[in-house]
Amino acid sequence: GAEIAAASRGNRIQDGDDKDYQVILPALPTGRTVVNTVFLHGDLRARPFRVEDFRDAIAQTGRLNEVVALGAYQVNHVWAVTLNSPEA
């Protein structure tokens, strides 16, 4: 099931199969400015994350050359990855 926190605090979702893994998201932006951006969620228990954690995982896919920006988004467990095109 999903439990939704107050709108100003984002969303909190707990997977029914894994009670230890929670998805906690801040309010995410919409519109043209983020059309080429994906948001990655990391396990809260593994914090703090470093840019290398996400960079290395993306590099393993062979797509690092398509990334134009990478960084934490408001909180350390949510990262924004901006790509060079919608097809990337």
Image (tube, rainbow, N blue to C red):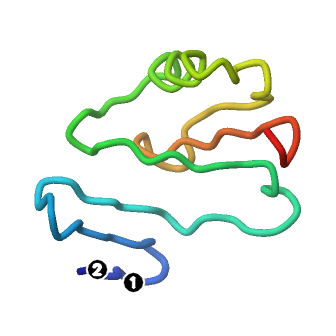
| 1 or 2: mark nearer the eye | 2
Q: Quadrant of residue 27?
A: bottom right
Whether tag 1 and tag 2 are in contact, CB under 8 A, the answer is: no
The residue shown at (36%, 61%) is: 24
Residue drawn at point x = 66 percent, y = 18 percent: 62
Q: Is residue 39 above or below residue 29?
A: above
Query: Which residue is depicted at the point 11% across and 61% down?
Result: 19
Marks counted in the figure total 2
* Residue 2, label in figure: 2
- Whole-percent x and y of residue 33? 85, 57
Classify residue 73 as left or right of residue 13.
right
Q: Seen in the image, is 76 located left or right of residue 38?
A: left
Q: Tell me if residue 52 comes above or below residue 76 in the rendering.
A: above
Could you tell whether 28 is left or right of 31 in the image?
left
What is the secondary structure assignment of the residue under circle 2? strand
Image disc number at residue 6: 1
- At 48% from the left and 78% from the top, the residue drawn is 8
Q: Is residue 47 left or right of residue 8?
A: left
Q: Which mark is residue 37?
A: none
Distance, label 1 to label 2, CA atoms, is 13 Å
Type of amino acid at the residue the image marks with label 2: Ala
Q: Residue furthest left?
A: 19
- Circle 1 crowding by C-alpha within 10 Å: few under 14, some 14–19, many from 20: few
Kind of residue at badge 1: Ala
For label 1, the SS is loop
Q: Say which quadrant the C terminus sits in.
A: top right
Q: Is residue 87 or residue 6 the one in the foreground?
A: 87
Percent coordinates x, y for residue 40 in the rendering: 51, 45
Quadrant into which the N terminus falls: bottom left
Res 18 quadrant in image: bottom left
Crowding at mark 2 (Cα within 10 Å: few <14, some 14-19, many 20+):
few
